[in-house]
Image (cartoon, rainbow, N blue to C red):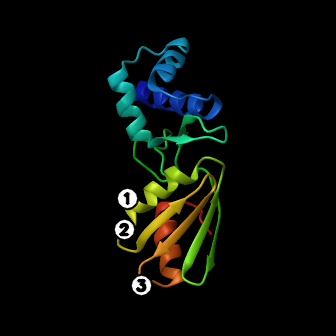
């Protein structure tokens, strides 16, 4: 498990530090760092890390970490805050500000894990419009999102 944890840490670091637009580029970076990894293993690791491919500010695709990422310091999946800056309400609608390029991946996670309370999301580059279902209060929406996003206030 220690080798896997190190590999996952390395993948997270490469994706954070470098503009990686496909698995072949990531595979080459991992080989450069001395990791003997196959494309199939790399694909599973990307899924486990919940790394998504999104458009960057230049209109090019790149891999990005989402807010729900595997915490490699533990052997269990945990929620980690990555990229969320703020959450504000206007009426029943909520607006979440994120780091540039992170909104799409975070919105996808909200849609996947909070569908009972969230009707849907609309994501730009760094902003997510969150549309709650009828009957959910602001406090309930904050609590639901806080269960997905650690340290959300």
* 89 over 44 or under it: above or below: below
Residue in the image at 41% along x and 72% along y: 119
Query: In front here: 147 or 76?
Result: 147
Does dot 3 land on a helix, a strand or a loop?
loop
Residue drawn at x 61%, y 39% as measured from the top left: 59
Asked whether 39 or 133 is in front, the reply is 133
Q: Earlier in the sequence, mark 3 or mark 1?
A: 1
Q: Secondary structure at mark 1?
A: helix
Mark 1 burial class by Cα count in 10 Å: few <14, some 14-19, many 20+: few
What residue would you read off at disc 1? 112
User: Which residue carries the number 3 mark?
Assistant: 134
Decide which of 24, 152 is in the foreground and name it.
Answer: 24
| Residue of label 2 | 115
Mark sitting earlier along the chain (2/3): 2
Q: Is residue 67 visible?
A: no
Q: Position of residue 63 (x, y in %)?
A: 53, 36
Q: Does residue 69 appear in this view?
A: yes
């Amino acid at each position: 498990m220690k080798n896997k944890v190190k590999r996952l840490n390395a993948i997270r670091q490469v994706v954070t530090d470098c503009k990686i637009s496909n698995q072949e580029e990531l595979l080459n970076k991992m080989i450069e760092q001395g990791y003997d990894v196959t494309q199939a293993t790399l694909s599973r690791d990307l899924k486990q890390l919940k790394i998504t491919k999104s458009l960057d500010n230049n209109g090019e695709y790149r891999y990005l970490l989402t807010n729900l990422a595997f915490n490699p310091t533990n052997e269990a999946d945990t929620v980690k805050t990555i990229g969320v800056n703020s959450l504000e309400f206007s009426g029943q609608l909520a607006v979440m500000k994120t780091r540039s390029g992170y909104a799409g991946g975070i919105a996808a996670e909200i849609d996947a894990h909070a569908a009972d309370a969230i009707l849907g999301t609309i994501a730009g580059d760094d902003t997510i419009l969150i549309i709650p279902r009828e009957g959910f209060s602001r406090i309930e929406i904050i609590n639901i999102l806080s269960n997905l996003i650690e340290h959300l206030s």
